[in-house]
Image (spheres, rainbow, N blue to C red):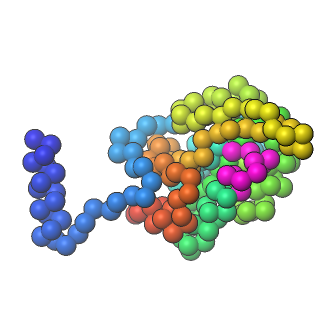
Amino acid sequence: MRSLIFLLAALLALLTGCQPYEYHGLYLDSAMSVPAVTLTNQNGQPASLADFGDKLVLVYFGYTFCPDVCPTTLGVVNQALELLGDKADQVQMVMVSVDPERDTPEVLANYLSNFNPSFVGLTGSPDQIASAAMPFGVFYEKHEGSAATGYLVDHTASVMVLDREGRMRLVLPFETSAEDMAADLRQLLK
């Protein structure tokens, strides 16, 4: 039965000249709702991902002391938002810190303002961060670095996209280009 439906959809696409959109990231057709976890934003106020329910929410778990992956990812997200033009105000970037020892609200505010003033940073206790990361399947682990860096944190480097109902719809892997990210976001905004 499923193959018949696929065949009919393909035939309809051929006849109408319309091809289904192919996402650059991993599209989740049976999206799961993400439970609300309240953390502290970069202004020291309680905040949760549900606070942005009228927008697509890009969720990234990272930290401000990250030497490479985090600044690269935030830069690409900023470029993707620029490519969206006037639709960018329908998207909210949220970085949840996996290093609550160093990432105070003030540190997050300063760091994120270097990328885009609209980016939101969230932090909390280690237990709160773990509760926020679990539904996303995010891995993070502290390990010793050099004498200069102290410790570093290995972490999942994907950007997860929540739809306006708070359901995870898309996972954008590290190294997704700004153009591909913008195209996927444009499609989700339709």
The total number of labels drawn is 0
Q: Position of residue 2 (x, y in %)?
A: 15, 43
Question: Which residue is located at x 67 percent, y 63 percent?
Answer: 75
Furthest residue in direction top, as rendered: 127
| Quarter of the image where the N terminus is located | top left
Looking at the image, residue 127 sits to the left or right of residue 50; the answer is: right
For the residue pair 22 and 87, the one nearer the viewer reads as 22
The image position of residue 44, as x and y in percent, is 81, 43
Which SS does the magenta portion mostly show? loop
Percent x, y of residue 127: 70, 25
Residue that appears at 73% across and 62% down: 115
Q: Is residue 2 left or right of residue 91?
A: left
Q: Is residue 27 above or below residue 139?
A: below
> Residue at the location (90% across, 44% down)?
148
* Residue 87 in view of the camera: no
Quarter-of-image position of residue 114: bottom right
Q: Residue 20: image x %, image y %?
A: 27, 62
**Outermost front residue:** 146
Extent of the magenta region:
62-71
Residue 81 sits in quarter: bottom right
* Quarter of the picture holding the C terminus: bottom left
Q: Is residue 128 above or below residue 147?
A: above
Report the front residue among 159 and 141: 141
Query: Is 22 or 168 nearer to us in this picture?
Result: 22
